[in-house]
Amino acid sequence: MSDEPFDPTAPTVGVGPRPLPWPEDPRLDPELLRDGDRRNVVDQYRYWKLEEIVADLDRTRTGLHVAIQNWEHDFNIGSIVRTANAFNVAAVHIVGKRRWNRRGAMVTDRYLHVHHHEDEASLFAYLHERNVTPIGVDNLPGSVALEATTLPAKCCLIFGSEGPGLTEAMVAGCERLVAITQEGSTRSMNAGAAAAIAMYHWRLHHES
């Protein structure tokens, strides 16, 4: 059964009711077959139950993790989560405040494994137990150019809040820092855009 909220003002997307007779497939949700599937999912998963989609995605999760510091209820978090879903990352980690701005995620977080950590130490302990290399993404002194770096296959890209960036404690715990080379006048780019570039860069070196 789908548990995504229905927005009557949203434009029509997805597919309508499935004509009878319905396929005999336990992965399919009878309510979605009857009423239509308006979720933001690829065609492969039309009419599938949420838990069945998650289980199928789990079979092909990548070695990439993504962590986001949540000190300011940053609106970019939702955008980063949505991109993380697109790359089917192993997990998303929210560090700091438990509540985060989900609007930009477009409910894609329901298809991911999202973990909360109270502080930097908790995140690093989680990653260390699983041999995941923490990589900070910020244009700070000591950062190396992302485009000239091959990221580890099993790593966690860590992003700070929009504006202040990574905290000192987060920087201290990272194995290295990477930055996206810029040519313009702005000191930094939007955190959601930077995250998308960094995840795509990882993907270029680690094909499924």
Image (cartoon, rainbow, N blue to C red):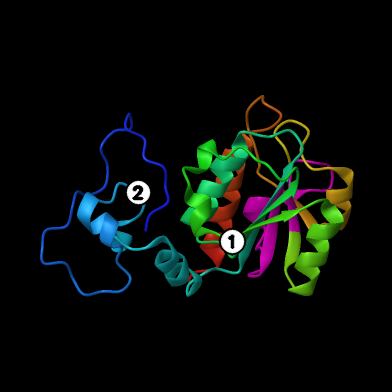
On-image quarter of the N terminus: bottom left
- Residue at 55%, 65% (x, y): give it: 205
Q: Amino acid at mark 2?
A: Arg
Q: Is residue 138 magenta?
A: yes
Using residue 101 as the reference point, say whether residue 82 is left or right of it.
Answer: left
- Residue at 68%, 42% (x, y): give it: 99
Which image quarter: residue 56? bottom left
Q: Earlier in the sequence, mark 1 or mark 2?
A: 2
User: Where 92 falls versus 189 (above or below)?
Assistant: below
Do we see residue 175 in this rendering? no
**Residue 192 spot, x, y in % from top left:** 59, 40
Q: Nearer the viewer, residue 176 or 192?
A: 192
- Label 1 and label 2: CA atoms lie apart by 19 Å
**Residue 118 spot, x, y in % from top left:** 81, 51
> What is the secondary structure assignment of the residue under circle 1?
loop
Magenta span of residues: 135-159
Q: Residues within 10 Å of mark 1 (few under 14, many from 20)?
A: some
**Residue 186 spot, x, y in % from top left:** 67, 26
User: Where 165 falls versus 61 (above or below)?
Assistant: above
Which mark, residue 113? Answer: 1
- Residue at the outermost left position: 20
- Residue at 10%, 62% (x, y): give it: 20
- Residue at 55%, 68% (x, y): give it: 62
Using residue 156 as the reference point, say whether residue 197 is left or right of it.
Answer: left
Q: Is residue 99 magenta?
A: no
- Would you name the residue on which mark 2 appears? 39
